Image (spheres, rainbow, N blue to C red):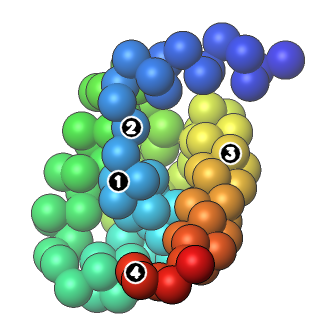
Amino acid sequence: MLARPMLPIMDKAGLELALLSKFVLACQAPRLADAARQLGQSAAALSMALHGLEEKLGLKLFVRRANGLDLLPPAFWLFRVGTHLLYLEELTRRARPAPGMR
């Protein structure tokens, strides 16, 4: 099972939710430029962020092609876990009482 060996890598990498969010969006978009546009940044900046993620994790996540990204097996796992983590983070943020409310 891939989940157990990956979690220590993610801990060591100090994976930030903002970077994870960019990764998930890049996986969902038909083209990297589309994901970058949704994030309000250039495709080059997003590509650099994704390359940095690969370096942090010590894994190759994508095969880059002119028409988009092809996900490699570790990317599928990270996408599945990442979407779940981002969903839980959103639920937690919504469940927190507003300041001054209890």
Q: Which is in the foreground here, disc 3 or disc 4?
A: 4
* Quarter in which the C terminus is drawn: bottom right
Q: Which is in the foreground here, disc 4 or disc 1?
A: 4
Query: Which one is earlier in the sequence, the residue at label 4 or at label 2?
Result: 2
Secondary element under disc 3, as helix, strand or loop, is helix
Q: Are marks 3 and 1 in contact (CB under 8 Å)?
A: no
Q: Nearer the viewer, residue 76 or 90?
A: 90
Q: Nearer the viewer, residue 50 or 98?
A: 98
Q: Residues within 10 Å of mark 3 (few under 14, many from 20)?
A: some
Q: Residues within 10 Å of mark 1 (few under 14, many from 20)?
A: some
Q: Residue at x 61, y 33 (%)?
A: 74
Q: Residue at x 84, y 17 (%)?
A: 1
In-image side of 15 versus 92 (left or right): left
Residue 59 at least partly seen: no
Residues at marks 3 and 4, CA–CA distance in whole angstroms = 30 Å
Query: Which one is earlier in the sequence, the residue at label 2 or at label 3?
Result: 2
Question: Residue 31's x, y, as percent?
Answer: 43, 76
Residue 28 quadrant: bottom right
Q: Are marks 2 and 1 in contact (CB under 8 Å)?
A: yes
38 to 80, vertically: above or below? below
Circle 2 residue: 15
User: Which disc is residue 80 wearing?
Assistant: none
Residues at marks 4 and 2, CA–CA distance in whole angstroms = 28 Å
Query: Which one is earlier in the sequence, the residue at label 4 or at label 1?
Result: 1
Circle 1 residue: 19
At label 3, the amino acid type is: Val
User: Which disc is residue 99 wearing?
Assistant: 4
In-image side of 3 versus 31 (left or right): right
At label 4, the amino acid type is: Pro
At label 2, the amino acid type is: Leu
Circle 3 residue: 81
